[in-house]
Image (cartoon, helix red, strand yellow):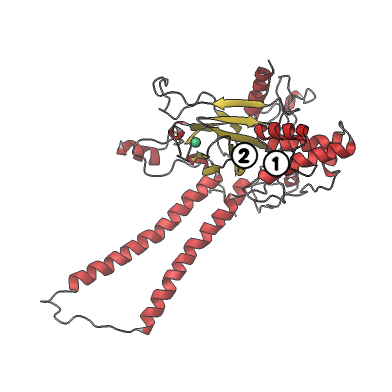
Amino acid sequence: MILRSLECRFLTIALCDAAEPWQLGSQDAATPMMQGIIDLHHDIFFFLILILVFVSRMLVRALWHFNEQTNPIPQRIVHGTTIEIIRTIFPSVILLFIAIPSFALLYSMDGVLVDPAITIKAIGHQWYRTYEYSDYNSSDEQSLTFDSYTIPEDDPELGQSRLLEVDNRVVVPAKTHLRMIVTPADVPHSWAVPSSGVKCDAVPGRSNLTSISVQREGVYYGQCSEIRGTNHAFTPIVVEAVTLKDYADWVSNQLILQTN
Amino acid sequence: MAAEGKVPTLAEEYSLPPKEVPVEKPAEEKSTTSTVAEVVPQKDTETSPADETAAPVEEKSETPEVKEPEAEEAIPSTEESDEAPEETEEKPEIVIETAPADFRFPTTNQTRHCFTRYVEYHRCVAAKGDDAPECEKFAKYYRSLCPSEWVERWNEQRENGTFPGPL
Ligand SMILES: [Cu+2]
């Protein structure tokens, strides 16, 4: 299992867009946002290891030398201006090096003022999701809307992930700015797709926006991340990114289906 | 800044690639002549320094009304390259277009954005008459932004005269 994880990490045949057993790292990035998050994680880990090694060395060394036989008189430092300056300045510099990329990522992530090409509304229900594609409407009633239910535990087909597969996937075009409007119809939900680096809370009476731009075609899995009831764990999200042309085909097919 | 083969920066990734689709001029004009007290954000606020988007002039096609006409019989067959996002023989014409980003609502919370567009549409209709063509875009905007449940409820409230907004 660990081998499989490593295989997924390093011998990438297909990119990991769904969780897998014993997974330690993130799923592979499908959006620049997720790439940014992974990069930030690695950046911070550099400092983390640095501090860990340094502090452990000091600690072990102090324990080692604090010994009655070899060092009967311990060092008695009560004051040292230089070391105090260093140990104040240095950590703040480290914090600065963490803060700058962190804020840069944070502000670039809420790219609310980027003009999207498509708006998709994800409406959380107990316990399924409704997706509305209303860019193609010509009246309030008519709308491209469908429900997305989880495939029950006892009848997934071969190759489908247990409790991660839905009957109707959200189809989105790749390499296109998408505006996801996230809102629930009953209790709080959360629309989260790890590969996209998106986790957007759905709060009743409020519509939240998150913009994503999926960079490659594929199927991405996520789960409701607001566990406030029995079946939130069973409302997965499946995003299927296709080419813009296929998306247009899909939309027109769906529109024909819905009008008939 | 980005050498070939390097991972593009966030800004580069986020800038739309210059689309080779014809931007319909009349559509753009129609959108700029906004009617009621209302401002359409004219230009993209994120001017990216992306050099992978070779033509910065094309970047202007990022303005709200990027039209990508599908199902256009006029497209010559030479343009049927696999990259071109148009083409579809199906009946309904799919125009990839949605409500533009609005600088009045720069936050994650878009509740007011939807509400404002809804109110704008109904004020527009009240001012210009029921089938004024310039109101149609507000209708498109609010339908894109509002969950249909909310629209239904507001329509009901308007009929009953209990709509809480300034109509
Ligand atoms: Cu939920």
How far apart are labels 2 and 1 at the CA level?
Answer: 10 Å
Q: Residue furthest right?
A: B128
Report whether B136 appears left or right of A240: right
The residue lying at 76 percent from left, 35 percent from top is B158
- Give how far across and how far down residue B166 sits, in percent: 78, 44
Residue B19 shows in the view:
yes
Amino acid type of disc 2? Ile
Q: For residue A181, which numbered disc appears in the image?
A: 2
Residue at disc 2, CB closer than 8 Å to ligand 1: no
Q: Quadrant of the C terminus of chain A?
A: top right
Residue at disc 1, CB closer than 8 Å to ligand 1: no
Q: Secondary structure at mark 2?
A: strand
**A202, A3: nearer the viewer:** A202
**A137, B76: nearer the viewer:** A137
The residue lying at 41 percent from left, 19 percent from top is A155
The residue lying at 70 percent from left, 41 percent from top is B114
Q: Are marks 2 and 1 on the same chain?
A: no
Q: Quadrant of the N terminus of chain A?
A: top left
- Give how far across and how far down residue B92 sits, in percent: 73, 22
Amino acid type of disc 1? Cys
Residues at badges 2 and 1 in contact (C-beta under 8 Å)? yes
How packed mark 1 is, by other alpha carbons closer than 10 Å (few <14, some 14-19, many 20 or more), is many
Q: For residue B114, which numbered disc appears in the image?
A: 1
